[in-house]
Image (cartoon, rainbow, N blue to C red):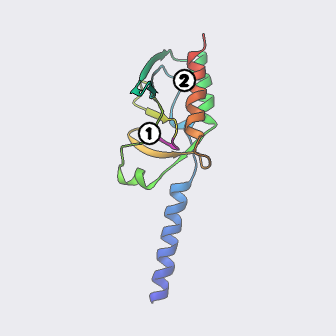
């Protein structure tokens, strides 16, 4: 009897781990075809003082930049973490934060210098490998937004 409980517990844990680690497409989670409001907060230090800069962008529905950002997001995945399940709402160490709102109630925050993101007020892990994935994605989005 004891052995069967261990097998059941192991099976439940394996299913839970697979569900948490299953890749979800970031582009499907955030609809970039709608109008998008983006707020970029860049954290830095200048001459020993904290120097935060904010950039605001409005992208109309169906805009070329919005489509390119949607394509970029579609190249990335996210998956659950223990923080997702426990309701953790803080991401520490971000050098850049991009807040997206598509007007349809979907909120997305990408963070540079971390491997985490917020999606609808929950913390998730971005992709699987590489600590710089968040920074690379933020820089790519900012490059699109800053184009003339």
Q: Main secondary structure of the magenta part?
A: strand
Front in this rendered view, residue 140 or 102 = 140
| Residue marked by disc 1 | 118
* Range drawn in magenta: 114-118
Q: In this view, does 123 lie to the left or right of 33?
A: left
Q: In which quarter of the image is residue 138?
A: top right
Please state if 68 lies on the left or on the right of 112 as rendered: right
- Tell me, yes or no, whether the highlighted magenta stretch contains residue 145: no
Mark 2 neighbour density, 10 Å: few (under 14) some (14–19) many (20 or more): some
**Quarter the C terminus occupies:** top right
Q: Which of 48 and 78 is in front in this view?
A: 48
Q: Is residue 116 magenta?
A: yes
**Residue 101 in sight from this viewpoint:** no
**Is 103 above or below relative to 122?**
above
Quick check: 144 above or below 87? above
What is the total number of numbered labels drawn onto the structure image?
Answer: 2
> Is the residue 10 above or below the residue 90 in the image?
below
Q: Looking at the image, which residue is at 52% across and 57% down?
A: 19
Circle 2 is placed at which residue position?
33
Residue at 52 percent of width and 35 percent of height: 112
Q: Is residue 136 above or below residue 18?
A: above
Q: Which residue is drawn at 50% across and 33% down?
A: 30
| Label 2 with label 1: CB-CB less than 8 Å | no
Q: Find residue 69 and report its image quarter.
A: top right
């Amino acid at each position: 009897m004891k052995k069967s409980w261990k097998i059941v517990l192991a099976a439940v844990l394996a299913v839970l781990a697979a569900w948490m680690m299953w890749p979800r497409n970031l582009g499907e989670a955030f609809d970039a075809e709608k109008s998008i409001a983006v707020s970029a907060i860049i954290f830095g230090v200048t001459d020993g003082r904290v120097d935060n800069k904010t950039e605001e962008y409005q992208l109309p529905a169906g805009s070329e930049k919005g489509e390119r950002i949607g394509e970029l997001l579609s190249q990335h995945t996210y998956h659950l973490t223990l923080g997702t399940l426990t309701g953790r709402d803080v991401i520490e160490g971000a050098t850049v934060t991009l807040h997206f709102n598509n007007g349809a109630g979907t909120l997305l925050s990408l963070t540079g210098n971390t491997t985490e993101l917020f999606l609808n007020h929950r913390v998730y892990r971005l992709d699987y490998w590489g600590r710089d994935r968040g920074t690379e994605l933020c820089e790519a989005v900012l490059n699109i937004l800053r184009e003339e």
